[in-house]
Amino acid sequence: MPPDSRDYKNLTDYLQHLYQREPFTRAGIEHPVTVYYPADWQIHDLDSLLDPTPPTAESRDFAVYDYSYLHDLQNGKPGLHNGRTFTLKSLREKPLKLRGALGRYYDMLATCAAFERELRAAAAQGWMRAPARAAYHRQVQPPEALRRGIKRSAAIGIGTLTVFNDAGQYKALLARRSDATAFDSGMYHVLPAMMFGPTTADFADAREWSVKHQVLREVLEELFNMPEQRSPARWDFYYDHPALRYLSSLLDSGAAQLCASGIILNLLTLRPEISTLLLIHDPDWYRRVTAPDSDMPLATADETLRDSLVAAPIADDAVFLSHFPADLHLMMPAQATATLWLGIDLARRLISNAPAIDN
């Protein structure tokens, strides 16, 4: 259940005091995440955010591990899969860069996701007590926990705000998550949003350590309902998909842009999220994917609640928010809120500098 505004503020205040980091703020509301911003030259080079060293597996050495919470999720969500994830090894600010390791999805649930569950439950009871987090910080001090992913499985996420040109009006996509997701079910999120990890067996090809590669695959899965493949024979198995060929042609010509807007550290989970923007200037893209006889129809995946997709104009904050329930931030994961507004701000800047397009 989403927190109320008082609980949300209490969570944010508690985490700001604990980690001594400025929270992301929008319209006077502080959020329990902190943002690391890319250098200007990194905005148009997503993979510049990654250390080029391919991630490797490390020992499963965790300060705390919530087996009970993991078992509850496994019993309540039988479709969960303990896939490989890329995890945070270290974070450097100047230039902004993540170094990765290999982990497992279940370990993320039993460590980082459990941190959030514990703290939200405490806030709902009006008593900010987090014994598992305190036990973790007896081994890893808060400042070090922001820089390194040690003693937990800090799986890296990627959130992409998709903004497109609809007959001259730029709009952003949000949708609600379905019960098929492990957590945050029913909450609004950017599309696509994903766990960053390899698909090939045992991370067989280091070229999967790529933000751009992952985002393009998830665009196909979450916006065009391409079936997810586990352990495909080829790391680039989806490169011939017609929707990707079309989008790639737009990216190559400058009619679309794929950009980095920051790295968000969710202080609730102590997990990083790479924040990105897919900005499509060519109005033909939206016309084509929504045409009744489209050869590449827009269609969301099972992880998205049916008929929950909203396309809202981004020119003005108030107009954008009018398309959603009041206090939208209480119905979104905190990192998604930051990705949303970072993406909108970046999109506005890029649109203002873009050459005129015949709509």
Image (tube, rainbow, N blue to C red):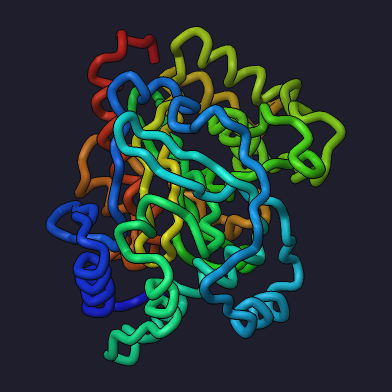
- Observer able to see residue 163: yes
Q: For this view, does 192 lie left or right of residue 201?
A: left
Which residue is pictured at 58% across the width and 31% down the height?
Answer: 53
As displayed, is residue 63 above or below residue 339? below
Query: Residue 307: x percent and y percent?
Result: 56, 55
Query: Residue 255: x percent and y percent?
Result: 45, 14
Which residue is pictured at 52% across the width and 47% down the height?
Answer: 193
Q: Residue furthest front?
A: 139
265 or 259: nearer the viewer: 265
Query: Residue 65: x percent and y percent?
Result: 58, 76
**Image quadrant containing the N terminus:** bottom left
**Image quadrant containing the C terminus:** top left
- State the image quarter where residue 289 is shown: top right
Q: For this view, does 291 lie left or right of residue 238?
A: left
Query: Residue 56: x percent and y percent?
Result: 66, 43
102 or 175: nearer the viewer: 102
